[in-house]
């Protein structure tokens, strides 16, 4: 995918209201790699209330060092956050693109998460 095509795609995705809409749009993209990556994530997101926030998690299974399956959850964003957070996570998780690059394609400023 050319840079200008990527920028156009990211800007179109940013017009969506929530994660499910973005994921559906990714599944209908012209780029087959993106479609397959989006389809592989179907059903892997969960909403949970934590510290008074509605958080969206990517829930998946992975093998630990003993070869045993374990369920893991990665916090992606809060419900109501700008969908750019999910879009940047998607391209980072699936294609190793720096989140800053995705934000730049959308014309937005990326802020590094604060470490606690």
Image: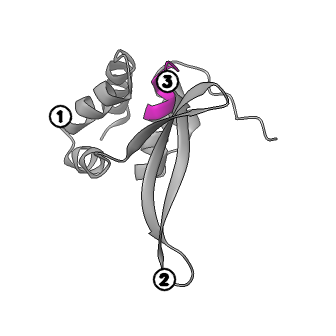
Find the magenta span and give its range: 80-87
- Count neighbours of disc 3 (C-alpha within 10 A) and say few if under 14, some if 14 to 19, many if 20 or more: some
Kindly check if marks 3 and 2 are in contact, taking CB atoms under 8 A apart as contact: no
Q: Which residue is mark 3?
A: 79
Sequence-earlier tag: 1 or 2: 1
What mark, if any, has residue 28 been given in the picture? 1
CA gap, disc 3 to disc 2? 34 Å
Specify whether 30 is left or right of 104: left
Q: Which residue is mark 2?
A: 67
Q: In front: mark 1 or mark 3?
A: 3
Sequence-earlier tag: 3 or 2: 2
- Count neighbours of disc 1 (C-alpha within 10 A) and say few if under 14, some if 14 to 19, many if 20 or more: some
Q: Residue 110: image x %, image y %?
A: 62, 27
CA gap, disc 1 to disc 2? 35 Å
Asked which secondary structure carries label 3, the reply is loop
Which residue occupies 30% across, 50% down? 37
Q: Residue 85: image x %, image y %?
A: 51, 30
């Amino acid at each position: 995918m050319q840079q200008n095509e990527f920028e156009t795609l990211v800007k179109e995705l940013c017009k969506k209201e929530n994660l499910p809409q973005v994921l559906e749009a990714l599944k209908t993209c012209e780029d087959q790699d993106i479609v397959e990556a989006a389809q592989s994530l179907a059903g892997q997101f969960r909403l949970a209330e934590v510290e008074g926030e509605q958080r969206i998690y990517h829930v998946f299974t992975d093998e630990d060092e003993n070869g045993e399956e374990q369920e893991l959850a990665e916090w992606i964003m809060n419900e109501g956050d700008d969908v750019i957070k999910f879009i940047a996570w998607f391209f980072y998780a699936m294609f190793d693109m720096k989140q800053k690059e995705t934000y730049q394609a959308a014309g937005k400023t990326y802020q590094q998460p604060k470490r606690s």
